[in-house]
Image: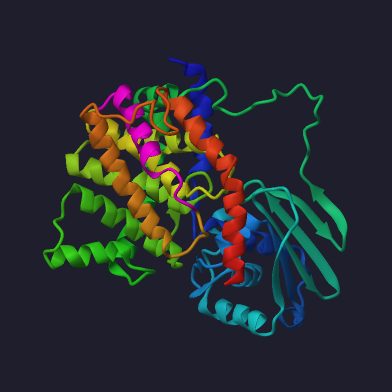
Amino acid sequence: MKKHLWNGFTNIVKKEVVPALGCTEPVSVALGAAIAMRRIAKGEALNEQLRIEVLVSPNLMKNGMGVGVPGTGMVGLPIAAAIGALAGDPDAGLEVLKSITDEDVTKARVLLDDKRVTVGVAAVSQILYAQVTLFANEQSVSVTIADSHTKVIEIRENDTVIFAENQVKVDDKAPKDSSPFCGATAHDVYEFAISAPLADIDFIEQAYQLNEALSLEGLTGQYGLQIGATFQRNIDRGLLSQDLLTDIMRRTAAASDARMDGAMKPAMSNSGSGNQGIAATMPVVVVAEHLKVDRETMIRALMLSHLMAIYIKSHQNKLSALCGATTASMGAVAGMTWLLGGQFTQVSAAICNMIGDITGIICDGAKTSCAMKVSSSASAAIKAAMMALDGIRVTGDEGIVDNDVDATIRNLSALANGAMTQTDVQILEIMVQK
């Protein structure tokens, strides 16, 4: 066992698996606006004078155009910027909108009605980028977030830089690759999840608590396309049975329904995405409850799922044309396969089965229909797990799948980072021309 990797594994999970209220792309804009507003001199006429300009990367524009912003009943980046500026908590990270009120939303709508919020695409190389500039009281404050959803790289006041992220020089002695996955394999991830001291990994239980609550919200409310509720209605009608497969799709989709339509409940995210966190959590939870496993077993399965999802995603750009729910579900298939009695041979086979099945599902922006892709990925995961447990595996002679699981993951990521970048450009062109 490569126990020297374990501290890094723990730290990366704590960094990448965090609560997030709402879709993380518009939330990133809201956070930038909240941080900027803290530096704007307050005055009685502030709301009448306030003007907001937002510039984002094409990928962030794609994921922010049509998704619900929590607590507002509206979609898109303009309302995210407005409500973030007027009522966001600049210290709350991805939960920046947790304390907004109906009165705040009313004030934010005024900014939109008065056309005092503009959003445009920035000519930048970063995949994830948002610059939010507030103008008021003859003052301007600009906050730039890039590379991750809460990473502030620059703050300007009246065109003067007052904060800039420290850049590591090329000739510094710091290691070129500080990733916790440097030298690691999928087998190392597996060994950590099933062998690490429980006290070191039981924090992952919060993923179950938050995403289960979001799932229940989606089943009881009328959110989005009601994918989870649709499954439930057809169970009640006798058209579907409440078996393991249906329950996985029902409960996983319901959490995404609620999240994508602006429910005021946080998701436990994974790799900067609430949907990825849901996809890595709920299928595992459903299987664990179906098998009636103990708390420790569920925790280890959740850790295997979330860390494997992060490991796979670490090979890819933060945002791309490849649907992130599919890669997160490749983490879920690892957790489910282990719960169902599989060892690493079956886990690796299940991941390869997933890559042989649903690779290429596109991300055409964050929106309510993402719940359909989440449910499709969850159903593909349980199918892949059951095949692997029966000794059935997509072979290295088929498509992009290799005989080695790590090579297969690299092939998947080469596709996402290479040819699918042009797909991303085409998707955005279609979306903005509608």
Please indicate whether residue 116 sits to the left or right of residue 8 in the image: right
* Residue 366 spot, x, y in % from top left: 50, 60
Q: Residue at x 60, y 72 (%)?
A: 79
298 in relation to 56, above or below: above
* Residue 85 spot, x, y in % from top left: 66, 69
Q: Quadrant of the C terminus?
A: bottom right
293 in relation to 345, above or below: below
Residue 331 visible: no
Instruction: Please identify the quarter of the rendering in which residue 186 is found.
Output: top left
Q: Residue at x 44, y 42 (%)?
A: 327
Instruction: Please identify the quarter of the rendering in which residue 260 is found.
Output: bottom left
33 in relation to 409, above or below: below
Q: How is the image coloured?
A: rainbow
* Residue 181 spot, x, y in % from top left: 54, 27
Q: Quadrant of the N terminus?
A: top left
Residue bounds of the magenta highlight = 342-362
* Residue 226 spot, x, y in % from top left: 32, 67
Q: Residue at x 86, y 74 (%)?
A: 138
Instruction: Please identify the quarter of the rendering in which residue 264 is found.
Output: bottom left
Please indicate whether residue 183 sits to the left or right of residue 110 in the image: left
Assess whether residue 141 is covered by the magenta stretch.
no
Please indicate whether residue 295 sits to the left or right of residue 83 in the image: left
